[in-house]
């Protein structure tokens, strides 16, 4: 898959979370800009330079719902996903009635965030297909299924994210640290052994679909997806 040049606006007043969100999106081949208050969010959004917007509801100056209402009044149809710790039903309804496309409560997993971002961008009609391929190996981003020929294996969330990274850059070494920062977060306290376990499970599932590919470990470098030697 080629490099993507889609741009997401992230409006989140928590600087640590905002930095993490931008990092996650950029690690998934998306361009991302971060702002910390509602006034900036509206100014940036009205530039029309974004393919999707992630809005926190509780922001200084203007809250997310006010920002979205102002965008829709001005005729801006950019897809919007609310990201908020407030999970009461009436607040979800208020956001959706204001013109939001989706709603993701905190805390959230990286895999769910990215899946919802992809869904949001598909509604705009500008994102890549759900199927990621390497030769005849297929990874279905909607169902988390790995398929080769008529054989299918369902991946867990973390297995899916690792496989997606490998299939986006086949025959390219990906450092273990990159898996950790992309999937678990740049500040997560996760042992390297966790990656080993998921890689081991992925190898078994690749074998189960009888695909002629393997995930190889390159000493002092990382992992690479390629054809069996």
Image: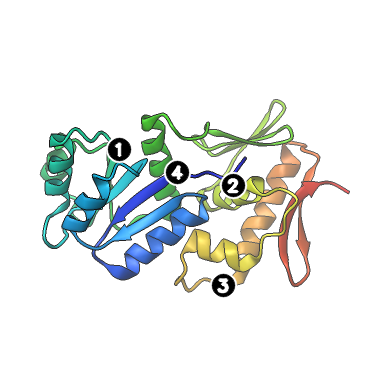
Q: Are marks 3 and 2 in contact (CB under 8 Å)?
A: no
Q: Position of residue 121 (x, y in %)?
A: 39, 37
The picture quadrant where one finds residue 167 is top right
**Depth order, front residue of 17/228:** 17
Mark nearer the viewer, 4 or 3? 4
Q: Mark 3 = which residue? A: 191
Rounded to the nearest whole Å, what is the CA distance between mark 4 and mark 3?
A: 32 Å
Mark nearer the viewer, 3 or 2? 2
**Depth order, front residue of 199/91:** 91
Mark nearer the viewer, 1 or 2? 1
Q: Is residue 82 visible?
A: no
Mark 1 or 4 closer to N-term? Answer: 4
> Is 65 situated above or below 196?
above
Mark linked to residue 6? 4
Q: Residue at x 47, y 49 (%)?
A: 30
Q: Position of residue 37 (x, y in %)?
A: 20, 61
């Amino acid at each position: 898959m080629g490099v993507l040049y889609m741009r997401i606006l992230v409006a989140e007043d928590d600087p640590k979370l905002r930095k993490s969100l931008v990092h996650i999106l950029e690690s998934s081949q998306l361009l991302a800009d971060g702002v910390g208050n509602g006034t900036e969010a509206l100014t940036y959004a009205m530039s029309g330079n974004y393919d999707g917007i992630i809005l926190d509801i509780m922001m200084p100056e203007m809250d997310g719902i006010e920002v979205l209402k102002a965008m829709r009044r001005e005729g801006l149809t950019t897809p919007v996903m609310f990201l908020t710790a407030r999970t009461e039903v009436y607040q979800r309804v208020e956001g959706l009635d204001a013109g939001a496309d989706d709603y993701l409560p905190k805390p959230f997993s990286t895999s769910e965030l990215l899946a919802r971002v992809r869904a949001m961008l598909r509604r705009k009609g500008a994102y890549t297909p759900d199927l990621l391929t390497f030769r005849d190996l297929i990874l279905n981003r909607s169902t988390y299924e790995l398929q080769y020929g008529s054989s299918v294996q369902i991946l867990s969330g973390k297995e899916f994210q690792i496989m997606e990274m490998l299939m986006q850059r086949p025959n390219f070494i990906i450092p273990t640290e990159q898996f950790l920062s992309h999937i678990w977060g740049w500040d997560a306290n996760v042992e390297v052994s966790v990656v080993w376990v998921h890689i081991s499970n992925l190898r078994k599932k690749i074998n189960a679909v009888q695909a002629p590919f393997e995930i190889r470990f390159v000493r002092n470098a990382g992992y690479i997806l390629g054809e069996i030697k």
